[in-house]
Amino acid sequence: MVTSRIRFAAEQKAELWERWRNGLSVAAISRVLDRRNKTGVLRIVTLRGGIVPAPRRRAVAALGFEEREEISRGIAVGRSLRQIARSLGRAPSSMSREVRRNGGSQAYRANRADKRAWEQALRPKPCRLALNRKLRWRVAQKLVLQWSPEQISGWLKREFSTDQDMQISHEAIYRSLFVQTRGVLKKELTAHLRTRRQMRLPKSHNAKSGRGHILDMVSIRERPAEADDRAVPGHWEGDLLTGANDTHIATLVERHSRFTMLVKLARKDTTSVVAALAKHVRKLPEELRRSLTWDQGKEMHAHKRFTIATNVQVYFCDPRSPWQRGSNENTNGLLRQYFPRGTDLSRVSQAHLNAIAMRLNQRPRKTLGFETPADRLQAVLH
């Protein structure tokens, strides 16, 4: 399909692999990257066998962009390649090859030359199994006998202790099995692995829930003390209230006053949730925008976008610790009076949610000395 061939920018690929390393599923990564389907992400992960590629670096001896700019400026003012080479501490022959391969003195441009060098450096080097037929045969033979790559590697080191060419790490064997673009070991050999897995999965991988793998997650333990003792307004707790047919609304409760806001959600994906929350929070006065505490649900994977849009830092509770959002949990219980389990929340309008929130905010609370959340918040603001 054409959609699977849509290119990913370098920044997107870097984020894709970072999230894969942290255990997100292909579907979750696709949602975070705003891809309509998971085909593109799956293709990239599968081609690499789930193995995160090493970050690219320039060779120490390679020309850098600053040096290429110096060459370009030197040519522009009429300096010879020998003079330019001397100023850079490089061999004149290196300057000559660099300029010749990039169109000559008349056409040389630093940006274009540097980009071309970076792209040409992508050519992969053949791995040890590709170069050593005898070693490749030994590894394949042991895989058929259902030896693990670690057992094969250890056996080779003992059997050929004096022959470095007949030794290989277990990681290199896994790479040759999973990264099929290497074309070294047949894909069918993965069937002899104990797990019969077709690709490398991160140890923390949790494809079902996606919980506990949020990038740059800030723990509730780092939340300001003023939020813990409820002395200062502007610190919120949030969660999703679930209805029938996988429908949801977002609930926000201010810790100082127990003031509640309800937010209609079109979908549960992180892009939809973060956008809807940010839209509502941006309407608040600045003094009521201090922090938000949430559980480790995948709907807040894009929490950094929320913080950039609202200037509100998000803190995450410990796993399975709903009491760390006690006010929010209590409010969600109260909301079941209006939205019993099994209610299709997609049919509830934002206007109706606002009306229910107003009813809660004008109801006296024992914990507030029977003051209403609306009155408590109004007194603080004035």
Image (spheres, helix red, strand yellow):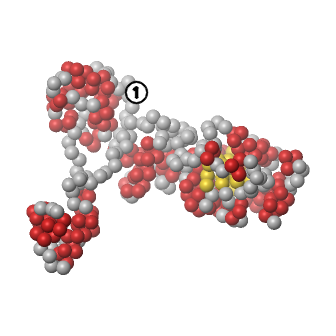
Q: Quadrant of the C terminus?
A: bottom right
Q: Residue at x 20, y 36 (%)?
A: 128
Residue 67 in the image: state x and y as whole percent: 23, 65
Residue ID for mark 1 = 195
The quarter of the picture where residue 295 lies is top right
Taking 258 as reference, is 202 above or below it? above
Q: Residue at x 51, y 39 (%)?
A: 207
**Few, some or many residues within 10 Å of mark 1 (<14, 14–19, 20+):** few
Residue 316 in the image: state x and y as whole percent: 61, 45
Instruction: Using the image as rendered, state which of residue 20 and residue 248 is in the foreground.
Output: 20
Residue 252 in the image: state x and y as whole percent: 71, 52
Residue 308 in the image: state x and y as whole percent: 57, 61
Q: Is residue 332 visible?
A: no
Q: Is residue 9 left or right of residue 331?
A: left
Q: Is residue 6 left or right of residue 88?
A: right
Instruction: Using the image as rendered, state which of residue 57 and residue 202 is in the foreground.
Output: 57
Taking 15 as reference, is 176 above or below it? above
Q: Residue at x 15, y 73 (%)?
A: 105
Q: Residue at x 23, y 70 (%)?
A: 70
Q: Is residue 229 visible?
A: yes
**Amino acid type at image mark 1:** Thr
Q: Is residue 310 left or right of residue 83?
A: right
Secondary element at image label 1: loop
Taking 273 as reference, is 112 above or below it? below
